[in-house]
Amino acid sequence: MTTLVVCLDRTDDVGRKTGLRSPIVGWEAVRALVTDIGLADPEDSGVNTLLEGLRVAQDLRDDDEEAVVAVVSGDRESMVSADRAVARQLDELIAEHEPDSAIVVIDSAEDERLVPVVESRVRVDSVDRVVVRQARDIESTYYLLKQFLADEELRQTVLVPIGLTLLVFPMLATVVGPAEGAAAITTVIGLFLLYKGFSVDEIMTGVAHQAREALYSGQVSVVTYVVAAGLTFVGLFAGALGISSLESQPGVVVPATQFAFEAAPWLAGAAVTTSAGRLLDEVIGDDAIRSSYLNLPFLLLAVGLVVRGFSGYFLAQQGVLDPIDIPPIEHGVISIESFQITAGERLALYVASALVVSLVGARVASYFSASGDDAPETDGSSPDDDGPGVASEVTDGGAAAESDGPDAEVETYADPTAEAEPDAEVETYADPTAEAEPDADPTAEAEPDAEPERPQPSAAAEDGTVSTHGEDREQDSDVPPR
């Protein structure tokens, strides 16, 4: 059994440093090559690769196996030419020594790409990776940086912000000071990281695409979106005015509650307007209206009422809102004295109104959904239509339906035990496994005008033949041709 111990050198370091041409075969030749490369470049890891190849060959010989150690180098012109040079040298070695298997010795990720080339020509029993202890971290870092720089997206995401930071920070430090410059740079980097982390670019692209599609398709929701944006702006402005009208209040709880109290009606109106636009698009469209679109406006209105009620309750507890005074009401014989609605009563009214609105929405959605499900499905024909346009009627093995017209042909699935009428011209598909009906006598004799041997003819041809269960028989003369 012959084993080929091959040391791979894709970048041709052997030829560049020693001037020798590969392949280099044999124990003594490889041993001399170690000295030549070591003298030319003592820091080259290829020396360790050659020594590892010699050690593996020696271990195989100690186990009474025939081992051939060789060094195969590539080409420096291009990676393709290097791989082809290695393949050509491997073919020469295999043709000369005829090894049964091979052990590949490599020292870098670049050389490891040649392993499939070796595997395509001879069975590879082992791949021996030589890593110099002092250079492991350096080599790993080098290849990581190389892969990082090869990725264009990573370069744009990482290197561009770092480069801008290094350019802008000296100018900011000179103009406004180092602390202010560092703060500005940190803020920009934080915003950029949030922008990429939340995929804001993808969200904006999707929104722009949806807006363009909505404009070109003529959807009503485009107008309602614009109205909702205006109502949202009004709500934010009303909330800001509500905060400015407050006297000096400690903390942020009361101003935030005041903002919610003033902005809630406008924001709820914006949400209802948006959902109403989507609902109109569904109504105009050909598809059935989904119950979620019907229930959404009522649900958003109910949420707005709840927010308004709780924010008003908290403000009333802090003395910002006064109780509601209802003046006396007199209308004919009806007389109502003046009364006052407290904060708790107002909250109860808002919550009750929200519940009523949500229940109404659920009822409306369920009603329209039920009416859509109960709609009859028609295929353009009536089951009771016996006019001339009906060509056939399919039964389940019972008696054939009677034809209303003299020329009507009835296509049925007939019971094979049923008696055939002599003058009836029917086309049937008999089911041999069907059970006979209780009223049908399978042993009954056929009428005098019908042949007893052919109880169920399937079709009458013009030439006087009839096909029954795949057999052609001549039709009697007493049965008129079709």
Image (spheres, helix red, strand yellow):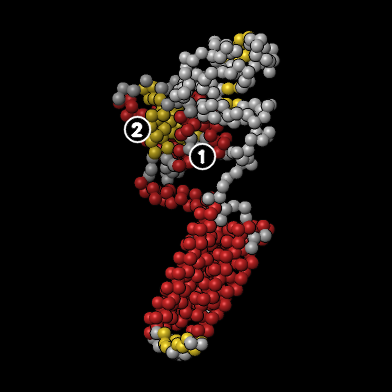
User: Which disc is residue 11 wearing?
Assistant: 1
Instruction: Name the quarter where the C terminus is drawn.
Output: top right
Say above or below: 432 vs 343: above
Q: Is residue 451 left or right of residue 341?
A: right
Q: Nearer the viewer, residue 212 or 5?
A: 212
* Residue name at image x 42 percent, y 73 percent: 352
Q: CA distance from mark 2 to mark 1?
A: 23 Å
Which corner quadrant of the image does residue 106 belong to? top left
Give whichever of 77, 212 is nearer the camera.
Answer: 212
Residue extending farthest left: 63
Q: Amino acid at mark 2?
A: Arg
Give the quarter of the image for residue 237.
bottom right
> Which residue in the protein does label 2 denote?
55
Type of amino acid at the residue the image marks with label 1: Thr
Q: Nearer the viewer, residue 285 or 471?
A: 471
Can residue 238 be seen from the camera position used here? yes
Q: Residue furthest front?
A: 448
Mark number displayed over residue 461: none
- In the image, what residue occupies the spot 57% across and 45% down? 377
Expressed as whole percent of the image width and height from the top left, the position of residue 208 reads 61, 61
